[in-house]
Amino acid sequence: MKLTIADIARQAGVSKATVSRVLNKRAEGVGAETRARIQKIVAETGFQPSAMARCLATGQSCSVGLIIPDIANPFFAQLVRGAEAVLNRDGYSLFLCNSDRSIEKESDYIRVLIEKGVDGVILNSAGSALDTQVEMLEAKGIPVVLLDRVIKRRESRFGVFVDNQGGAREAASCLYAQPDCRLLFLNGPAELSQSVERLAGVEEAVRELGIPAQRLQVINSDFTPEGGYHAISALLDQAGKTAALPFNAIFAANDLMAIGAARALHQRGIRVPDEVELIGFDDIEFAAMLEPPLSTIAQPAQEMGANSAELLLRLIAGQKPRTKTLVMTPRLVLRGTTRARAVAAEHKHHIQEQ
Ligand code: RIB
């Protein structure tokens, strides 16, 4: 028969509440000898408190909401995978919500998560301009950790991000290392914090390298493969078949748009990397499987997800982490869509994959 918390309490000669406090690491006031006796019985019997029992004892739901903007994008799946592993380790359930890049849907999900009584929320927001949706959670005292994308008043909130500007600067510098580089920066939606920060990185590289303005063209798309495909097709069709290509290098602000761009180039017989070099951003699992394999700026997505979950669990436990935000470092990964090049010393941490 399945052991219950009452059986442990009886064997240890204490109340169920005392056993629960020891199990939930809230054993302030429980004597060391009693704590050791309870832990010994739990270990010897292999007792596993049901998550529900633990939650009932502590009045928490032991559940967390995680909202992402686009479940179809493998980058977000990597974030979720990292967060889920940490939450599962600590016995928390995860409500995964896909806002489908809609702020309205994101706000609706936040209301649902409040009704479900989650203990905390990890938010990868569909937009960067608002924070009213987060204020709903804060008004209820529900801890929030931002992940990957910032929102208004980011500095006053907890979050885990990547150095978008540094990664974009590195990609652009790498492409401009080719003396005649005419770069097209295929950016995401202009209003998103990612796009703002990545554009700043490209412009920083242009300034640092003294690149003439006419050798940088910037367009915005929507972070999807279709968006990348149509954006590049339109530029190439506009240039016509005879004229010189309007660019000889593309830096796409995410891998999905890079994949769409590669298809548009391939359909027109334009060779990558001989005629046009291509770098993406994210390093989703398919990036290395393309032919030629995609050079990209790799984000530590699983680690970002895991770090956001660790941070949220500390907030749920009532701790006050001194560091509000963690900004992780992306990495230039050179594969087959860029030509071999003598890489400058400052890119020493890039990796060259065969
Ligand atoms: O691929 C989607 C993009 O938006 C990624 O670069 C990630 O940063 C997300 O916010």
Image (cartoon, rainbow, N blue to C red):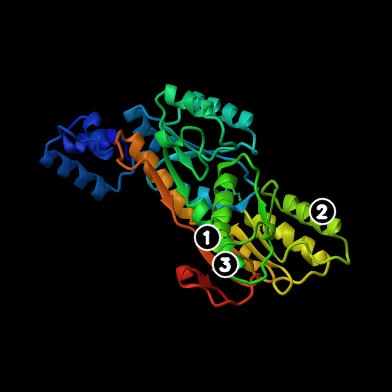
> Upstream in the sequence, badge 3 or badge 2?
3
Q: Nearer the viewer, mark 1 or mark 2?
A: 1
Residue 300 image offset from top left, x and y in percent: 48, 56
Q: Quadrant of residue 217?
A: bottom right
Question: For the C terminus, which image quadrant?
Answer: bottom right
Q: Secondary structure at mark 1?
A: helix
Q: Nearer the viewer, residue 328 or 79?
A: 328
Q: Amino acid at mark 1?
A: Glu
Q: Amino acid at mark 3?
A: Cys
In the visual, does 247 lie left or right of 173? right
Q: Do tag 1 and tag 2 residues touch (Cβ < 8 Å)?
A: no
**Residue 234 image label:** 2
Q: Is residue 352 above or below residue 297?
A: below
Q: Nearer the viewer, mark 3 or mark 1?
A: 1
Residue 23 image offset from top left, x and y in percent: 27, 39
> Upstream in the sequence, badge 3 or badge 1?
3
Question: For the N terminus, which image quadrant?
Answer: top left
Neighbour class for label 2 at 10 Å: few (<14), some, many (≥20)?
A: few
Q: Which residue is mark 1?
A: 208
Q: Amino acid at mark 2?
A: Ala
Neighbour class for label 1 at 10 Å: few (<14), some, many (≥20)?
A: few
In the picture as drawn, the residue positioned furthest to the top comes out as 139
In the visual, does 302 lie left or right of 97? left
> Upstream in the sequence, badge 1 or badge 2?
1
Q: CA distance from mark 3 to mark 1?
A: 13 Å
Name the residue: 65% across, 43% down.
189
The answer to whether one can see residue 86 in this image is no
Q: Which residue is mark 3?
A: 174
Residue 344 image offset from top left, x and y in percent: 50, 72
Q: Nearer the viewer, residue 348 or 32?
A: 348
